[in-house]
Amino acid sequence: MIWNDEPPLVLGCHHKTGSVLLTQFMDRVGSRFTQKLRLSKIVNGSPVDRKAPLSAILNHYQNPDCYINLWFEHEIDVAPDSIRLLHFVRHPVKWVRSAYLYHKKGAPSDSVRWLDRRVFRLKEEQVSYCEVLNRVDSATGLAAEAIRSFPEIIGTALVARTSSCLTHRQQVSLEQLHADFDATMGLICALVGFDETETSEIIAELKILDLSRASPELERTLEGDPMFHKLFDSAASDMGFRFSEMPRQSRSILPEAIVTTLLNGTSHLCTPWQAVERDRDFMLDGDSITWWLTYALQVSGCGHLMMHSFIQQLLDTNER
């Protein structure tokens, strides 16, 4: 157990919110804080279980000293003083912009090559997600990425909302790191338990990290889009962000019908596939034909393509 009886550490982020930083942090200083806090049981969580409630995860792993998941979408349903949570968030505009550019160039660091699978139809040809992004215009590509990222963003917002009552919580955004790297890393180190001298050494080690750069034109497209705003306004608020007050465009890159369906089905996208597997009434529900594939694809490729049917709907709509 942790030597000073502090609550266990829970470190969580999601793709495009801080996974690179958290991985680098653990690679460079993980052994240092393991020794300092005398952590005897560190668990790296599976992406397959990312939507399960945190209490079930901690019970499953028999209450580890430190739990880490780079696909963190757990509802925080534990006692307010029972954990110390470090959670990374990001503004939906910057999240979608970053994901679009990364996936368009082939997601070079992804070991699971989900975006090379030719499972989409574009102009009567079977194409992969990467090929889709490179063949359509940027507006359609951003719309596809907004749809694909929607479950990840609302899952991250769920963590932010349900963790707000925790006694020991540090929520960090990449925007904070861009604005003041030293101060933000200082907050992270303080939560973990490093003193001022150790924090200064760690900050110096992590200074070499290349944080993502802005792409103003793409961000303006998303900021001014009325349907993008409608789709992500609640999630942004839960994570502590606001959209700019810039004038909204008259036309949206996202079809209103898809946005309405996604917002009405948000609960499906926050429910773990294991829960539906045990629900005998699910396939009798009127919505099951719309949502069953999102559950089936939660596991395959870490769930990157669980929004396949909605992305295909977007492509078909734009071809008409």
Image (spheres, grey):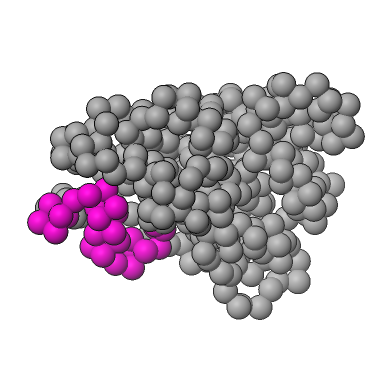
Is residue 84 rendered to the left or right of residue 228?
A: left
Of the pair 32 and 37, the residue shown nearer to us: 37
Coordinates of residue 288 in the picture (x, y in percent)? 82, 31
Is residue 151 rendered to the left or right of residue 193?
A: right
Q: Main secondary structure of the magenta part?
A: helix
Coordinates of residue 57 in the picture (x, y in percent)? 49, 30
Q: Tell me the quadrant of the picture where the N terminus can be found.
A: top left
Picture residue at 57% right of the left edge, 33% below the top? 52
Is residue 186 rendered to the left or right of residue 240?
A: left
Please provide the residue range marked out in magenta.
172-200
Residue 305 visible to the viewer? yes
The image quarter in which residue 299 lies: top right
Picture residue at 78% right of the left edge, 41% below the top? 313
Residue 149 visible to the viewer? no
Vertical order, 137 against 227 (above or below) = above
Is residue 147 rendered to the left or right of residue 2?
A: right
Coordinates of residue 206 in the picture (x, y in percent)? 21, 50
Coordinates of residue 265 in the picture (x, y in percent)? 76, 44
Picture residue at 66% right of the left edge, 52% below the top? 143
